[in-house]
């Protein structure tokens, strides 16, 4: 059964931009669909909701569209009693509402010069906060977040409707970046943001009930572009990496990102509720890190696993009118382990695997605690960033499993979904959204987390494609037992 909630009678002119075509093509409908076709069998002991954020451009872009510009759209697949329901909603940001009133795009994108006559968001205050990047479950709501620092939009986990936002400024904070993390053991949200004016970074903790529990400024030598953080049981790891705006051009309001290999990567370890003056910096080889895997404490050391990018800035443009855009979005990350010794002040870096993977996830109950397994996506041999496989790492055994989604099938960041009454770290399933370009449809695929090599246990056929997106999460049924009623 299909219920179309809204539909736009417009077709975007892609102008040949590959990030508006094929698996990146925006969709125009918000729907609710159940009684879906299932190939295979949905496990009876899987109960919960997979939620994934991503860009879905609503109006014709003003200038050159960048993948990061698209309006946030939340997709949700609920699984219960062997049945599945899919729904999707645009995140109703302040910027999207204004553009809906004007029936056109108002804000320039990431590649264009900002319009300082407009209210802006992001680290330089010149972007539209499209809230298209990450999603976490916090204080009974979904939080939708923006990679370049913005508002914390709250969504109803049952309907995916936007219900409001956390008043960070009213509590004395500034904004938050997308990769803020929830510690499931404490219920706290640990967050940071960054900007082009001092303080160049801030860091804070929200209590499980939403109040600001801790907030402090972090001293940096200048404007930086950190993308993520890591947490342990007692510490947070913040990053000062040598990929950031050209400082001289920034003074002219030109946001040109460059890599500075003469500078080290700096990792700042701060007690979870520590003042900015308590941070301890550890230096490692220059790099850029988009996403961490996990971090934990071992004696005097903080252990942090991450996906390290080896070529943060492209060495040359690719052919065609969008060659520069394509080159910047082709990255080469591999699995590395860092160790920061709080007693000696020494830092070590160790390569763990040499294949290119990204968008790593683990069993979220283990964030901040020692973990063994992680699940990543592998890159397709394609002009744009597309993912053709799931890769499981067993870091204790030093082994990997890799399974492809299928011919002309491209997936999203997965999530680990514990089976009902789960007993172990990989006792559950790996779930993800996939686009089948041959059939021109989306799928929700479910894998056995212990053995992803077996391929999907179930493929749930969706009535429309799901544009390639960014980050997702799994909300287990025991967490959402009340809010899931009526899906």
Image (cartoon, rainbow, N blue to C red):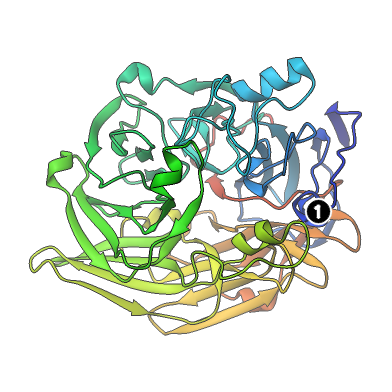
10 in relation to 99, above or below: below
Q: Is residue 371 visible?
A: yes
Quadrant location of the N terminus in the rendered image: top right
Given residues 455 and 381, the one toward you in this image is 381
- Nearest the viewer among 180 and 401 is 180
Is residue 234 visible to us here? no
For label 1, the crowd category at 10 Å Cα-Cα, with few meaning under 14, some 14 to 19 and many 20 or more, is many
Counting from the top left corner in percent of width and height, residue 459 is at 77, 61
Residue 320 shown left or right of residue 439 in the figure: left
> Which residue is most to the bottom?
398
Q: Position of residue 344 (x, y in %)?
A: 8, 69
Image location of residue 484, percent across then percent down: 61, 34
- How many numbered discs, if any? 1
The relative height of residue 96 versus residue 82 in the rendered view (above or below) is above
Q: Which residue is farthest left?
A: 343
Q: Quadrant of residue 60?
A: top right
Image position of 354 with respect to 56: above or below? below
Left or right: residue 10 versus residue 475 is right
Q: Is 400 displayed left or right of 203 in the figure?
A: right
- SS for dot 1: strand
Corner quadrant of residue 11? top right
Quarter of the image where one finds residue 78: top right
Residue 176 x %, y %: 41, 35
Please state, as top left, top right, bottom left or bottom right, where the C terminus lies in the image.
top right
For mark 1, what is the residue? 442
Which residue is depicted at the point 76% across and 33% down? 58
Nearer-the-camera pick, 24 or 190: 24
As rendered, which of 335 and 84 lies closer to the eye?
335
């Amino acid at each position: 059964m299909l219920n179309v909630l809204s539909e736009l009678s417009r077709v975007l002119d892609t102008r040949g931009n590959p990030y508006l075509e094929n698996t990146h093509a925006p969709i125009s409908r918000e729907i609710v669909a159940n009684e879906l076709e299932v190939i295979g069998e949905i496990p009876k002991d899987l109960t919960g909701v997979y939620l994934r954020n991503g860009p879905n451009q609503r109006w014709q872009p003003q200038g050159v569209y960048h993948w990061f510009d698209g309006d946030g759209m939340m997709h949700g697949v609920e699984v219960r009693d062997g049945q599945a329901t899919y729904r999707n909603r645009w995140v109703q940001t302040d910027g999207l509402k204004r553009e809906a009133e004007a029936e056109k795009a108002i804000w320039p994108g990431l590649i264009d010069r900002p319009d300082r006559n407009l209210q802006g968001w992001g680290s330089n205050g010149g972007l539209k906060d499209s809230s298209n990047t990450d999603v976490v479950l916090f204080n009974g709501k979904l939080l939708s977040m923006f990679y370049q620092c913005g508002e914390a939009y709250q969504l109803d986990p049952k309907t995916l409707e936007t219900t409001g936002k956390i008043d960070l400024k009213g509590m004395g904070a500034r904004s938050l970046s997308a990769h803020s993390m929830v510690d499931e053991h404490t219920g706290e949200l640990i967050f940071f943001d960054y900007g082009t004016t001092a303080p160049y970074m801030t860091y804070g903790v929200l209590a499980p009930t939403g109040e600001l529990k801790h907030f402090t400024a972090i001293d940096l030598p200048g404007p930086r572009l950190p993308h993520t953080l890591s947490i342990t049981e007692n510490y947070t790891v913040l990053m000062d990496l040598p990929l950031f705006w050209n400082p001289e051009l920034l003074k002219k309001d030109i946001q040109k990102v460059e890599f500075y290999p003469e500078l080290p990567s700096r990792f700042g370890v701060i007690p979870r509720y520590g003042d900015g003056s308590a941070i301890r910096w550890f230096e490692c080889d220059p790099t850029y890190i988009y996403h961490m895997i996990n971090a934990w404490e071992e004696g005097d050391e903080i252990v942090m696993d991450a996906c390290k990018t080896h070529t943060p800035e492209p060495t040359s443009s690719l052919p065609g009118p969008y060659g520069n855009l394509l080159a910047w979005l082709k990255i080469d990350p591999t699995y590395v382990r860092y160790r920061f010794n709080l007693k000696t002040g020494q830092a070590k870096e160790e390569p763990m695997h040499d294949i290119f993977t990204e968008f790593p996830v683990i069993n979220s109950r283990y964030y901040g605690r020692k973990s063994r397994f992680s699940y990543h996506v592998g890159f397709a041999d394609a002009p744009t960033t597309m993912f053709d496989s799931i890769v499981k790492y067993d870091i204790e055994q030093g082994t990997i499993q890799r399974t492809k989604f299928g011919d002309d099938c491209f997936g999203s960041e997965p999530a680990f979904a514990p089976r009902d009454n789960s007993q172990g770290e990989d006792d559950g399933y790996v779930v993800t959204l996939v686009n089948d370009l041959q059939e021109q449809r989306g799928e929700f695929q479910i894998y056995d987390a212990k053995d992803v090599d077996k391929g999907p246990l179930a493929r749930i056929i969706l009535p429309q494609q799901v544009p390639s997106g960014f980050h997702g999460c799994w909300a287990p049924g025991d967490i959402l037992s009340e809010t899931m009623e009526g899906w």
